[in-house]
Image (cartoon, rainbow, N blue to C red):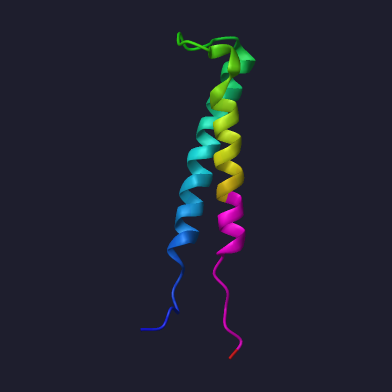
Amino acid sequence: MRGSGIPIWFFIGVLLLIYGALILGYGLFELATGYLAPVELNYLHTPVWWGAILTAIGVGYCIKFRPRRNKN
């Protein structure tokens, strides 16, 4: 069977992009409001870092594995 469909890696990139955007949004909300979750090392702002990393990886996957039309 030939791979004529949409690659699974594209959908993984979309999921990473969505999750990264949600986590990044929450992290930015924490920074803007001053509310920090009562956890250890909350001054490191891990939601901002992980959200940015996941978003960047998701964008990379979406660009690399985007569906293309064959010109044959």
> Above or below — where is 52 with respect to 29?
below
Q: Is residue 44 magenta?
A: no
Residue at 62%, 17% in the rendered image: 31
Residue at 61%, 44% in the rendered image: 56
Quarter-of-image position of residue 54: top right
Residue at 64%, 16% in the rendered image: 32
Q: Quadrant of the C terminus?
A: bottom right
Residue that sits furthest to the bottom in the current view: 72
> Above or below — where is 54 with respect to 9?
above
Residue that sits furthest to the front in the current view: 41
Q: Quadrant of the N terminus?
A: bottom left
> Above or below — where is 37 with respect to 71?
above
Give the extent of the magenta segment. 59-71
> Above or below — where is 26 with respect to 65?
above
How far across and down, in percent of the image, does residue 9 sit? Answer: 47, 60
How far across and down, in percent of the image, does residue 15 sit? Answer: 46, 48
Which one is nearer the viewer's eye here, 22 or 42?
A: 42
How far across and down, in percent of the image, does residue 30 sit? Answer: 57, 17
